[in-house]
Structures are given as C-alpha cells and as structure tokens.
C-alpha cells in the first residue's frame, strides 16, 4: 500500500494572511458545530410542532449526530484526494441545503432529512483542522490548532443559550433561518478567503468503504442512542448494535485489502494514533456527560431539595461560560503543546477534566457552583481537543492527514453517544417521586454518580494517553519519514 510523504516544515504552503484564514476556519467550524444543540430548547415541543410521536421526534436530535459521525471521516478522505477547499465549500453547501429544508419543511420526514444534512456539514471541521498546519507559520500553528479544534465543543455549548434566546423572541423556524444565514456566510468566506489546500493523491473514492462505514456506524449509534428507550435487551437494540459491529469488522477487513482505502487502518493501528483515538473516545464521553447532566440538574424543581429551578434560557446562560472557556484556553493549550508536547498536554487535560467532575460531585447547591465545575471541565476538554489533532497530525502521513483527523473526530462522537446512553441509564435507574402522585425524576445520587462516571472516563483517558510512546528526543516536532523493507515511505513512531 502506498503512503504519501509525511508532513513536515518543508511542505508548508503558508497563506498570505494566515490569521484571516484561521478566523474563517474557526468561525465556519463553529457554525457547523452549532447544529448539534440547535433544537434542544424545543425538543419537548417537537412532537406537537411536527405532528408526530415523541419517539419519532427524538430522531430530529439523533439525526445530526448520525450525519456527523459518518461525514467526518468521509469528508476527511475526500479532502486528502481532491483538496481541502472544495470539500469545505461543499460541506457548507450541504449545511445551507439542510437548514433551508428544515426552515420550509411541512412535516417530520423532511425536517429529519434536513437535520441529517446539517449533521453531515460537520465534515467541515476535521478538514479545517488539518488545513491549519498547512497554512500557518510555525509560531502560530499550535494556537490556531487549539482554536479551531475547540469549536467542536464550543459550538455545542453555545448553541443552547443562542437557540433558547431565538425561540423565546421568534417562531421556532427562526432557528433554521438563522442557520441558513450562517451557512450562506460560511459558503461565501470559504470560497473567497481560503487557499486551495494540498491534494495528495488522485485516487478513486472508496465508495464501498464509505457505504460500509455508514451502515456500521449508523447501526451501532442508533442501537446505543435508542437502547434506553427500546430496552437494552430488546431484539432491535441488540440486533442493531451487534449487526453494526459485525459490519464494521467486515468493513475493516475490506479496508485492509483495498489499495486506496477510505481509512488506512494500518496507520490507525499505529500505537500513537490508536491510543490517541481511544483517549478521544473517553474525552467525548467526558464532554457530553456535563452537557447532559448539568442542564437537567439546573432545571429540576427547587422543591426536590437539590434542583435549582432554572429556566431553559437561564440554564443556557449559566452554561455559556463553559463554552467560551474552551476558546479562552486556546493560548494556554498552544503554550502547553509547545512546551510539553501533545502527549503530556493530553494527559494534563484529562486530569483537569476529572477535577471539574469531582468538584461537581460535592458542589451542586447553587447555579454558580455548577457553572464553575463546568468551566473547569470545559478547560480540560478544550486543552484535550487541541492536543488530539496535534498528536494525530504528528503521527500520520501527509496524504492521510484529513481522513485521520476525521477518524479522531468520529471517535469523539462515539464517546458522546455512549455518554448519552450511559447517563440515561443512570438517571432512570435512581429515581424518586416529586410529591404525592407527582412525576418520577432522578434523585440527587443519580446526578452525583454521573459526575463520578465522567471523572472516571477522564482518568481512563489519562491512562490511555500515558500509553502513547514517547517521542525520541532526537526527533523533530514534526513526524519524520522512514523507509520500510519494500522501500515505501511510512510515518515515524512519534
């Protein structure tokens, strides 16, 4: 199997205005990530708004996750073949189409299709991350990587207060019209201000691999996200999860034998990449745990004795600082990457994330305490999200940069999905009744257990990170090439 040469300083094609390019990439990635939480403020009203059942309406939230999970590695691979700018512009067009469809659709089915397209637009993000290293001078690369990588978490966090405000002052369809406007801006600035980006290989697109990955990922994620609703022992849940995993195994065997695979699993199996991706799974879990648990705890009625009685809008405002914390920590992440390297930075990030959750276990009496806990946790997420693509880009061939970052983003997405399922099980297994004949709600210990699980996931990420082989001191910060026995250049061991 052929490999493109590894990325290195001599292969940079720095942009004339690198700061402007980075701002475009960060803003556009943020717009794509906003789609994750766009409809959460109206989730309870979706059955009535779309004239469907609550079970069907829940797919409007899940669809974006599924679309993004499939699109990120696929978009990354297409960018490696055809160049990054065309793929990013195409992703922005998909975002426009999906948003417009949701804005004008009259029924559940069309809105669902639109939400899938909005999720697919998240393929923009890993391509943007991989472009950063090509177009920035070395002195600003780590800062730029930190800022663009953080948008994956920032978008989800800031989407909640923004969406809550929009539905408070306007019709629910205004959410999607705002998305249409953002998508139009992203198309314009991506098409006019971004450089082309290097295309490494004119290979055929692995359509069979893309279809296999889509079937495997979607089946597995659907089974996991719906397991609590359908029952974890139901034939449908078990069939989807088991079937999805079987498809992924078969897909992997096919990819290993393919001359130009969608995902080069030999590269993915290298220890620095493998352990970084496994750590990404745990970080995704950790990020989503707070996004699910803290808003519910804040909105619990005060008469429970532990609920904080906040409205959706108030909850969004309390959560907003956590989202901005990820961007605020971009310079800190950059300095840590420069001083300590990706491995140590990622391990520190896991410790910070765990610290935020442990703080939350004991400090849940007021909204400001939970806000502080989420800010600490989000600082860890922001640092970790900056370190992971840096580790990936340092340990893969240049021709697989975008697809490898896409796989890493997929692993984060799998972590967030798993967190949603686990938190749902915990919150429905430890319950109490609100007053005589009132609704059954999670008790205080359920929320505390969720925070403990988030901390455990973060510490597992630390352990996985410490298994990443140390880079030899004689190696440069960028990956070296070496030649195997067949004379094929391959990535170094990082």
Image (cartoon, rainbow, N blue to C red):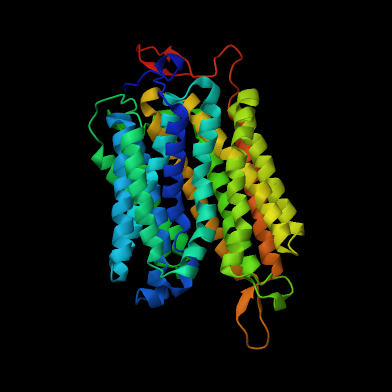
- Residue depicted at 35% across the width and 15% down the height: 488
Quarter in which the N terminus is drawn: top left
Quarter where residue 386 is shown: top right
The residue drawn where x is 62% and y is 46% is 325
Q: Return the x and y of residue 164 as percentages of the image width and height.
A: 51, 65
| Residue 86 vs residue 240, the one in the foreground | 86
Q: Is residue 199 left or right of residue 347?
A: left
Q: From this viewpoint, is residue 286 visible?
A: no
Pinpoint residue 358: horizontal percent, then vertical percent. 73, 52
Which residue is situated farthest in the left direction here? 204
Name the spot of residue 146 as percent of width and height, x first. 54, 35
| Residue that appears at 38% across and 75% down | 49
Is residue 298 shown to the viewer in this render?
yes
Q: Say above or below: 411 vs 431.
A: above
Q: Is residue 13 above or below residue 363?
A: above
Residue 465 vs residue 395: left or right?
right
Residue that appears at 59% across and 44% down: 326
Task: Identify which residue, 267 or 285, lies in the foreground.
Answer: 285
Give the residue at the far bottom of this rendering: 436
Q: Considering only vertical position in the picture, is 288 above or below 273? A: below
**On the image, which quarter does residue 55 sit in?**
bottom left
* Most foreground residue, 217 or 380: 380
Residue 423 x %, y %: 58, 61
**Where 35 sits versus 400, above or below?**
below
């Amino acid at each position: 199997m052929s490999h493109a040469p590894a990325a290195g300083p001599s292969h940079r094609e720095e942009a004339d205005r690198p700061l402007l390019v980075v701002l475009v990439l960060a803003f556009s990635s943020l717009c794509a990530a906003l789609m994750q939480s766009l409809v959460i403020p109206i989730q309870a009203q979706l059955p009535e708004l779309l004239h469907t059942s609550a079970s069907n309406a829940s797919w409007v939230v899940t669809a974006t996750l599924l679309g993004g999970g499939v699109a990120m590695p696929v978009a990354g691979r297409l960018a490696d073949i055809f160049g990054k700018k065309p793929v990013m512009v195409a992703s922005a067009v998909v975002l426009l189409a999906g948003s417009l469809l949701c804005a004008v659709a009259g029924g559940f089915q069309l809105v669902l299709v639109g939400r899938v397209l909005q999720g697919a637009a998240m393929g923009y993000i890993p391509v943007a991350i991989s472009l950063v290293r090509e177009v920035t001078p070395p002195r600003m690369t780590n800062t730029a990587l930190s800022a663009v990588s953080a948008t994956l978490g920032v978008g989800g966090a800031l989407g909640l207060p923004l969406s809550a405000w929009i539905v408070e002052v306007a019709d629910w369809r205004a959410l999607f019209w705002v998305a249409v406007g953002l998508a139009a801006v992203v198309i314009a600035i991506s098409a006019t201000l971004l450089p082309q980006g290097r295309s490494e290989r004119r290979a055929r697109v692995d359509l069979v691999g893309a279809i296999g990955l889509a079937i495997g990922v979607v089946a597995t994620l659907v089974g996991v996200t719906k397991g609590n609703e359908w029952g974890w022992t139901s034939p449908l849940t078990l069939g989807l999860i088991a079937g999805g995993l079987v498809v992924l195994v078969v897909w992997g065997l096919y990819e290993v034998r393919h001359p130009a695979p969608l995902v080069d699993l030999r590269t993915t199996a290298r220890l620095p990449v493998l352990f970084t991706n496994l750590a990404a799974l745990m970080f995704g879990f950790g990020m989503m745990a707070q996004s699910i648990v803290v808003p519910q705890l804040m909105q619990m009625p005060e008469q429970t004795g532990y609920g904080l009685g906040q409205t959706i809008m108030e909850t969004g405002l309390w959560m907003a600082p956590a989202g901005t914390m990820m961007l605020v920590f971009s310079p800190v992440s950059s300095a840590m990457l420069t001083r300590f390297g990706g491995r140590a930075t990622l391990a520190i990030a896991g410790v910070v994330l765990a610290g935020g959750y442990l703080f939350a276990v004991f400090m849940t009496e007021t909204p400001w305490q939970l806000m502080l806990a989420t800010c600490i946790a989000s600082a860890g997420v922001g640092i970790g999200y900056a370190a992971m693509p840096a580790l990936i880009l340092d340990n893969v061939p240049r021709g697989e940069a975008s697809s490898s970052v896409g796989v890493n983003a997929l692993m984060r997405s799998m972590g967030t999905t798993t967190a949603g399922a686990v938190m749902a099980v915990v919150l429905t297994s430890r319950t109490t009744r609100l007053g005589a004949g009132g609704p059954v709600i999670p008790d205080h210990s359920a929320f505390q257990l969720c925070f403990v699980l988030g901390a455990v996931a973060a510490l597992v990420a630390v352990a996985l990170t410490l298994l990443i082989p140390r880079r030899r001191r004689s190696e440069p910060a960028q990956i070296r090439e070496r030649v195997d026995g067949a004379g094929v250049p391959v990535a170094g061991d990082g």
